[in-house]
Image (cartoon, rainbow, N blue to C red):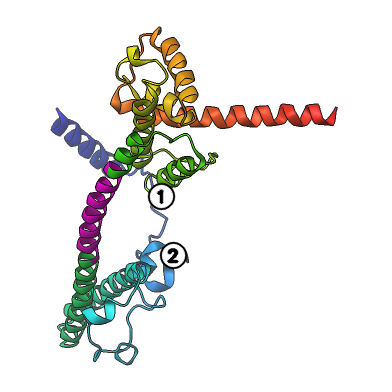
Amino acid sequence: MFKQQISKFSTSANLLARAGKGYRISPHVKLRAPILPTVDNISVNEDHPLWKFFNNKEFIRAPADIQFNGRAWSIQELRKKSFDDLHCLWYICLKERNKLYREEHIYKQTDSLRSYEYDALSEEIRKSMWKIKQVLSERDHAHQNVQELYNTEVSKYLDEFKENYLKDEDVESDAWFDKLERLQYAIFGIPDVLDYNTIVDLRFLEGIKYIGNLKFEKFQKAAGREDLGELRDIAEIYTIFEESATTEGVKSACEKIDEYRLSEIVIPGSKEIAVVQGFIDDKIKNSESDFAEVEEEEQK
């Protein structure tokens, strides 16, 4: 059917032409030769991204503008560079190789031997890029090794801290309060004063669990709340965490947990970070509201 439509269209066009009427274009119009696209009749925006493939928006650089006798960066030189410097150097090399590829392609179209010079220079730049990746890989491996060592040492320290804390009979003292405060900030990044810049991540969450469970294990018996059993979810752990590291503080937190358990809600692990972030944001808002009320009372 489609072929028949094409055939009919062509036939009708031929009939109109033979009849000498029905032209869509007047026979008196003189057609000019098509305009071939050239540099002179094409307008390109000054901020067009393809300009990055050109050097100073030139069609091709003169050989004198390119240093063909350069060499690749050595690994020893690159090891002295910062991460930001290496990052910038990588993209400078990448942009230069793109420019060389374009110019080399133009010379190849004309069978010019100069294309081999461009190819050799591009290879030197490629070596520099490979060495940048090598240096970054070395730093990444070193960071991983240090991180593994750090995690091992931190784990040992936390075990020793917990053992000493549970063993000591006088932990309701300024000395131990300061130790807990320094530990939660130095290892878990939990500040003493919370604000809207406080972001909960896995490390932050791990600190809340460690401090909360530590307080609960230490004061559960003294608070007479062994009937509570184990803490079920992050909401109960956070309730212990935000109270003072005292018998009365844990006792007050356990009473809040009793009310919470009446709802029969248990927060899954996948929601822990979002829930704790919500707790912190609500606490900051309440603190600001209380502060505003105090200011109003003082002004009266």
Horizontal and vertical percent position of residue 170 = 43, 35
**From which residue to which does the magenta span run?**
139-159
Q: Nearer the viewer, residue 254 or 26?
A: 254
Q: How many marks?
A: 2
Position of the N terminus, as image quadrant, is: top left
Q: Quadrant of residue 82?
A: bottom left
Q: Quadrant of residue 78?
A: bottom left
Classify 52 as above or below 13.
below
Classify 190 as above or below 276.
below
Q: Amino acid at mark 2?
A: Val
Horizontal and vertical percent position of residue 178 = 48, 44
Q: Amino acid at mark 1?
A: Ala
Q: Nearer the viewer, residue 82 or 231?
A: 231
Tell me, yes or no, whether the highlighted magenta stretch contains residue 144: yes
Q: Do we see residue 73 in this rendering?
A: no
Query: Dot 2 surroundings within 10 Å: few (below 14), some, or many (20 or more)?
Result: few
Front tag of 2 and 1: 1
Q: Do we see residue 48 in this rendering?
A: yes
Which type of secondary structure does the marked residue at label 2 adopt? loop
Q: Nearer the viewer, residue 214 or 168?
A: 168
Which type of secondary structure does the marked residue at label 1 adopt? helix
Q: Residue at x 29, y 70 (%)?
A: 90
| Farthest-out residue, top | 262
Horizontal arrangement in the rendering, residue 153 relative to residue 92 (left or right): left
- Give me the disc on residue 44: 2
SS majority, magenta:
helix
Q: Earlier in the sequence, mark 2 or mark 1?
A: 2
Q: Residue at x 22, y 63 (%)?
A: 142
Which residue lies under the disc numbered 1?
186
Query: Dot 1 surroundings within 10 Å: few (below 14), some, or many (20 or more)?
Result: few
Classify 2 as above or below 107.
above
